Structure formats: C-alpha cells, structure tokens
Image (cartoon, helix red, strand yellow):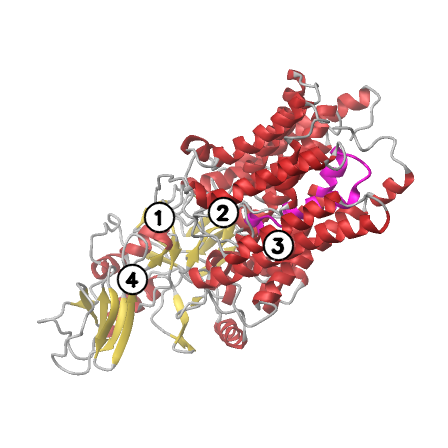
Amino acid sequence: MPNATRSQPPSVRLSGPLAPALAGVLSVVAVCGGDAVARVFPFGPRRRAVNDLANQFVPFHAHLWDLLRGRADGGLLLDWQGGWGTSFLPDYGTYLSSPFAPLVALFPRGDVEYAVYGITVLKTAVAAAAMTFLLRRTGPAGVWWWAAVLGASYALCGWSLAEGTYNPMWLDGLIAFPLLCLVGEWAREGRRPLLGPLVVAVCWLANFYTAYMATLGAALVLLVRLAVTDSFRWRTLLRAAVTTALGIGLAAPVLVPVFLGSRHAYPGVVRDFAPAAGTDVLARLLPVTYGFATPAAFVCTAVPLLAGALLFRRDAPGRERWLWGGLCAAVAMSMQWGPTHLVWHVFATPNGSPYRQTFVLSGVLVLAAWTGLAHGLPGRGSLLGGAAVVLALTVGALPSPLLTPWSLLLAGAGLAAVAGALLLPRRGRYGLLAALLVTGTLLGQAAATTAYADRERLARLDDYPPWGAEHERRAAALAAADGWPAYRTDSGLPRVAGNDPLLLGGQGAAYYSSHTPAVLTETLAALGGGWTSRGRNLLSLDNPVTDALFGVGARWRDGEVVRTDTRLPLVTVRPPGPPPVYGPSPFRNQELLLGARVYEPPHAGACPVGTEVFLWAPDATGTARLGDRVVRLLGGTPKRRAALTSLGVQRVPGLRPDLPGPGELGCLDHDRLRSAVTALRARAATSIRVAPDGIRATLPPGAGTAVVAAPRIAGWHCEGAEPVAYGGLLAVPAGSGELSCTFRPPGLRAGLATGALAALGLLGVTVRRVRSGRPPR
C-alpha cells in the first residue's frame, strides 16, 4: 500500500486530525445510544454492573480513588483492606495500571460507577481513533471519512460491545492492537527506535493479557506487510523483536510481580477447550447476537463486504489479495483449534469466555478492508464478489439458534446500504449521501448490538445494584466506626460485591481477584469461610471467634454497625510449641488457632441453652432454621462454598435446627471466648504501627511466637528471623522485644532489574543515534 504520509495535498493534511476525531465521536454515539435504548445505567433504571464489573473493576477503581487521595489503608505494595492484608501490586498491574484509570480521581467517590462508565466509553473512542490513525498512516490519502468509519467499526466490534464493556481492562488491548501495528510500521521503515519501545511498554503495562494477544496479532500483520511490500528482511524482524523486548522489559517491574502473583494464587478450574459450532461462529459475525462461549466477531457489514471484495479485485496484486485473505482466515480458524487457542491465551484455557482474542480478528478484517480501498472504491464485479462472500457467511449461519430476526434484518439492510453507497457516483452530494449511508449502517448496527448485549447480560449474568443512598449510609457508618490499626472494621453482610472492603471501607476478609492467594483461601476455608468463583471470591466470615483472632472490633450486621469487645490486637505472642495443624472441623481449627476450647458439642442434635449455634454445611443449598431464625445457604464445591453460619442463641432446651442437608453444629460459649481473649491480650503487642509496606510492633518480654493477624502470603520479610506460617498467619519467633516486617511482592526486585537493563538498552540506542547525527526519537 502507498505511504499516505508523503506528498499529501493541503486538503488531505487538514483532514488528517478530523478522521480520528470523527471515529471517536461515532464510537461514543453508538455506545451511548445503544445503552440509552436498552435503558441501562447511566441512561435508565436497568443495572449495568454484572459479574466482574461489579465484583472487581468498580471496587478496585474505588480503591485507586482512595490511594490517589491518600485515604486508603495500605499502598501500592500492600493492601490492608481486603483479604485481611494482601499483595496489591499484582492487582494494580491486572486491573488498574491503564493510563486511563487515574481519571477516576476526577469524580466524586460516590460517582465511581459513572467514572468507570466514562473511562469505558473513552477507551472505546481512543481505540477507534488509534485504528483510524493507523489506517491513515498506511493507506490512501483521499478517503479520510472511510478511515474514520472503518476505525470506528473496529472499536465497535462485537467483542468490544459484548465483552469489553463489562471487562474494561480488556479495552486497553483494543487500543494496543493498532498501536502495536504502528510500532511494526516503524520497525519496517527503521524509524522511531525510542518511541517504539515506549509504546510497547505502555500497552503491556495497561493490560498485559490483551496486550499479549495484540502483540501476536501485530506480528502477523507485520509479516503480511513485509511480504506484500517486498520489504521482507530478517533485519527488520530483528528490529521489531528488539523493540518489543525492550518495551516489555521496561514494563517488567509490574509484569513480573503480576506473573508471580498468578503462580501463588488459588488455582482455578482447569478446562479443556471445546470449539464452538461453526454455525454459531458464523452467526456471531452478524449484528444483534449474543453468546458467552462463542466469539463476538461482529463488525460493521462494510468491513466484511470490503474485505471480501478485495479477493476479487483485479487491480490489486494477487499476493496482496491472498495474503490478506489468508491472514483473516488463519486468525479465524486459529480460534477454533486447541493448540492455537492455547497460544492465544498464554497457554491456559481461561475460566470464562474462551474467545478473548476475537478483537484481533476484527482488527485484521478492518485492515484487509482498508487494503482494498488503497486501490480505490471497488468496481461492480469485485463488489458483487464481496456481497457473495457476506451472503455465503450469512447462509452458513442460518441454522444457529443465536440468530435473531434483527440480526438478519440489520445485516441485510446494512449490506444493501453499503453496497448502494459504493455504487453511487463519487462526487458532490452523492458523496455525502454515500457517507451518510455507510455511517448510518455503522451506528445502527453497533447501537442495536449494544442494546441487545445489555439486555442479554442482565438476563444471563449476576447483576448488582448501582451505588445509592443505602451504600452511602453503610460506608459512612463503617467510616465512623473505623479504628484501624487498633482494630479492624468489617464491611459485613449482606455483601454488595466481591470486594466490599475496597468499595465500602473497612478491613475485612472479603476479597476477589485473579491473584487471591492460595494460603488465604485455604486458611479462610479451614476456619469456616465461604466462597464463590471456585475459591477466588472470598466472603466475609461473621463469627465471634474469627473476629477475635483477626482483631475485628466492628462489623456491619442487620443494617447497622455492631461493635464487640472480644477482640485481639493485630499482633499477639503465643506460647512456645509447634504451630496448629488444621483438620476437617472449622470449630476445632478455630480453637487450635485461638489456643482454647470455646465450643461445646451438641447433645442429641441440640446445643446447650445460652450458647450460640453455628452451622457448618459448606455444600448445602437451601434454608436452615432454628426457632424463628432462618438462614439461607448457597454452597456446593468447587464453585461455591457456604460459610460457617450462626443460627442464633439456643433459648429452648432440646430444640434442634432444621437443616437443608448434612452439616456439623458447634455451640459457642461466649464466656469461654472472653476468657481466652483476656488471656491472649496479656501477651499482646504493646504498640503497633502499620505502614503501606509492612508492620512494626513492640512485644512483651518472653519466648514464644509472635503472630500477626494477616495471612502468611509470599513476600513478607522480617528483621532478625525468617517469617513462618502459624495456622496460615504471618509469624516470627519472639524474644527480641520488637517485630519489624516489611512486604515486598515476589518478583519486584527481578522486575526492577529487568526494567533497568531495558532502560540501559534504550539509552544505548539513544547514544548511538546521537553519535550518528540522527535525532533521538
């Protein structure tokens, strides 16, 4: 394709910035218009927050707001709020390292969901602008509005509208693909040796997962570009590889801790890839379809029409036609074959949608469509061939149950409109009419697909209420009760989302991340905790013994904050002896960690009067009842696990609870618990200081084991002794009178060293260019 950056007339140069801007505007209009039609937040009463959007992305952005405003408990390395104290840098690198994420601080905290929505729409617009810029950079000069339409078509692909919109971190990959293709162009031309690695670094920092997929796609595009333009040189490939390696190296201080954080995480369910039915794959190429386990490959009808027409264009070189057509087919087929599926997904089938690389296919189709336009608008013959390709794909999709009447109507109308626009005379008002027809097709199909996906997500996925007055009241009550680090305040139940401590405040057990540490999940489960999402979404554990062990002095319960005096400080000293070894009973495990017997066994299925009755039935689903106390359980491993649950105080002798299935009862004697807590307080730290990267405490004299009420996750380092696990908690031998432990995420030093080497390499490139008399860009 000719290089559009040389010898452009003034009118073309003026249209240059207009094309990306127009693409961004079209994307915003389509997304917001579709959401408005569906009447979802923020344009109507229907909820937008589903699944991970509510459980992870919104709470993590709320926590970022707190960090940026200096209000968070913890820092970039260590989060004291979720999971009783967890590593934060891997979460930051997974959910919050996008350059767009800090924009959340421009909004009031109570409007965090508006902020996340605004960032999502902005990312879509930037993806459209980035693709449009790439197209203008690599294609003809005289059809700038076509570049805008195709760039917006890429940003408004089905993957973006159906999946990226509620996984907004993935949208950084949508932006990365055209940017990395641009880096490939610079490598092909021997330009921008400094800017190239910086762009790669930003893309990989923003979201390494989709950036990896975008990098694979950009590499394939570069190979085709080299072959088509007769510029294939091994030196060019080496230059591109070095550029990519330097960029990834610059991002290593975050990437390496993210990688190791995944290795220390509680394992998810291993799945075998099962390709989708071919008819369903073809159906997802059309607008207004939805399916969780199929590739959302829809892209405006103008794109497959022009890409198909390229195959029949006699004015295009045969190598160009078949290489681009072959690339589109190869990427599509690679999504359906097990080995290449694993390559796309970093060699692990994802737990969820198995077609997360689909945006690369949409980008390749757009580039193929633009390649055809490099030779001018298609003639009647090639246009007929392109229409035949679109119709053949549609006919192949007809047996699919994913098709809707709107799919066929909008696809047919779009094909007629775009084909008609391409057949119109190319000057004057006919040119304007053509632009309106093509733009209208894009906006209509994309908005309708957005609205349909909005409705289908609500019908098929878990949804959560938006931030409102009740959330405000709860957050205010938790803030008023906060006493950290003297004691923890737990956000309690019922939960709002998977990361309530980050969203509402406090320092609780609830935590949900791809990096949920295995030691945290296993410890919480041993003590009676519950979970969803196969052990990575941990629930708050409302139990007086665990509250005492973890220093919870206040928690939300039954619509208000409830305080307790049976709590321990964050650091206590236990008598000399081996650490507790957990067994199958959470009641016995709690007693082992507490160092005292506080539960009585039930007699003939009933607890003694005056004790609090607790039920452990992790696999039960249904209603448990004791007198007028009714509790709903939702268990069933491995996906869900019901938490240890209070059935209330036994007030009637011999009253047995009604249970939904097998379970174990424990009868808590609160007087015994108070006595145990009093004994441990006598051996507690006399002063405690927490920091964003560790904890320090003054210990009472004497031997024993200093135990910190935080999970013994990888990364802790303590002065004078190697930290150990005490029932899953952080512990060190006592005796020096001081405890000083700092937290450094695993891989941080290696990442910093790698980043430094990459920076030195980039510095070497700069010095070399300066010495050669070339500008250091």
**Residue 699 position by quadrant:** bottom left
Q: In this view, does 324 lie to the left or right of 2?
A: left
Please, what secondary structure does the residue beneath circle 3 have?
Answer: helix
Tell which of 598 and 627 is nearer to you. 627
Q: Name the residue under label 3.
A: 445
Marks 1 and 4: which is nearer the front? 4
Q: Which of marks 2 and 4 is nearer the N terminus?
A: 2
Q: Earlier in the sequence, mark 2 or mark 3?
A: 2
Q: Which of marks 1 and 4 is nearer the N terminus?
A: 1
Q: Earlier in the sequence, mark 3 or mark 1?
A: 3
The residue under label 1 is which amino acid type? Val
Q: Which of marks 2 and 1 is nearer the N terminus?
A: 2
Q: Residue furthest left?
A: 604
Sort mark 2 into few (<14), some (14-19) or many (20+) by Cα contacts within 10 Å: many
Placement of the C terminus among the 4 image quadrants: top right
The residue under label 2 is which amino acid type? Ala
Sort mark 1 into few (<14), some (14-19) or many (20+) by Cα contacts within 10 Å: many
Marks 2 and 4: which is nearer the front? 2
Placement of the N terminus among the 4 image quadrants: top right
Q: Mark 1 points at which residue?
A: 519
Q: Name the residue under label 2.
A: 283
> Looking at the image, which residue is at 74% across and 41% down?
133
Q: Mark 4 points at which residue?
A: 642
CA–CA distance in space, label 3 to label 1: 48 Å
Q: Which of marks 4 and 3 is nearer the N terminus?
A: 3
Sort mark 3 into few (<14), some (14-19) or many (20+) by Cα contacts within 10 Å: many
Residue 501 in the image: state x and y as whole percent: 47, 63
Is residue 124 positioned above or below 384 on the image? Answer: below
Please, what secondary structure does the residue beneath circle 2 have?
Answer: helix
